[in-house]
Amino acid sequence: MIHSSAQVHPTAQLAPDVEVGPFAILEAGVKVGAGGVIAAHAIIKAGAILGTQVRVDHFAVIGGDPQDLSFDRSIVSGVRIGDRTVLREHVTVHRATKAGGDTIIGADGLLMAGAHVAHDCVLGDHVILANGCMLGGHVLVGDRAFISGGVAVHQFCRIGGGSLTSGNAVITEDVPPNALAYGRNDCAGLNLIGLRRRGLPLETVAELKKAYHLVYTPGGNCAALAQAGVTSGEYLSTEAQAFLNFFLGGKRGRFIQPA
């Protein structure tokens, strides 16, 4: 059902059961999958594609221009939102800076009120951004990461899957998978509660702990130690291998460190 006061561009493609609330705006080329709900006063900008059962709450703006002074507004780019993701009040997600590119948010995510996702970010599945969380441009967030309220993440940072970043943290360096980040680029160990909740075998958790202590050997080089761990063949679980390989990539060049 589309409210009579909503503005839906003739080229927008909406599944038959999509709900659009009062004064919502859906621009040219927008696509909304089955079961979608666009609440009152939400704005879905041109080029945004929403999967099935996506909910966009009041005053959210999806697909706005990047906050990049060099951005050419004539560039055609977009935003993709995965199935069953919920974007609460005043959430903003900006479109990509590259022609034909997309800012991507995966499936089954939750972006709480006031969260901001800048241009060219890529978020995995089951990602949660709490209230007022701010992601700079080109940030990569792995599956099941939880970023708490008020966290600010510097552009080009990677937030590893399964990690937990505590409230009001300032992140300017990469956060490894399943790590606990807090403060300003501080690490408090592994997200053991999250690992248990996911039901990982004890031997997998033990191997992750071993990999963590290898990489964070006092005075050592994280990347070199991680490479040694990968080469050794001692780490067999997917989680431990992902943890080690994380230190071999990225653009920021540094990683959060234990306090």
Image: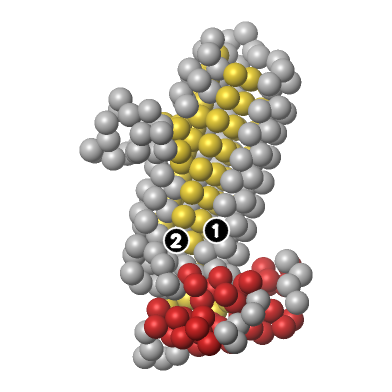
Does residue 195 sit above or below 33 in this rendering? below
Q: Is any atom of residue 180 visible in this view?
A: no
Question: What is the total number of numbered labels drawn onto the structure image?
Answer: 2
Of 127 and 15, the residue lying toward us: 15
Q: Residue at x 28, y 40 (%)?
A: 68
The extreme bottom residue here reads 218
Residue 218 image offset from top left, x and y in percent: 41, 91
Q: Is residue 214 above or below residue 89?
A: below
Residue 250 visible from this viewpoint = yes
- Viewport quadrant of the N terminus: top right
Q: Residue at x 51, y 76 (%)?
A: 244
Q: Amino acid at mark 1?
A: Gly
Q: Secondary structure at mark 1?
A: loop
Q: Residue 204 in the image: state x and y as whole percent.
A: 69, 79
- Find residue 7 and report its horizontal and vertical position in percent: 53, 13
Residue at (72, 83) in percent of width and height: 203
Distance between mark 2 and mark 1 Cα atoms: 8 Å
Q: Secondary structure at mark 2?
A: strand
Q: Quadrant of residue 155?
A: bottom left
Q: Earlier in the sequence, mark 2 or mark 1?
A: 1
In the image, is residue 104 above or below residue 35? below
The residue that mark 1 highlights is 142
Q: Residue at x 63, y 34 (%)?
A: 51
> Decide: marks 2, 1 in contact (CB < 8 A)?
yes
- Comparing 99 with 81, the one in front is 99
Task: Determine which residue is flagged by label 2.
Answer: 158
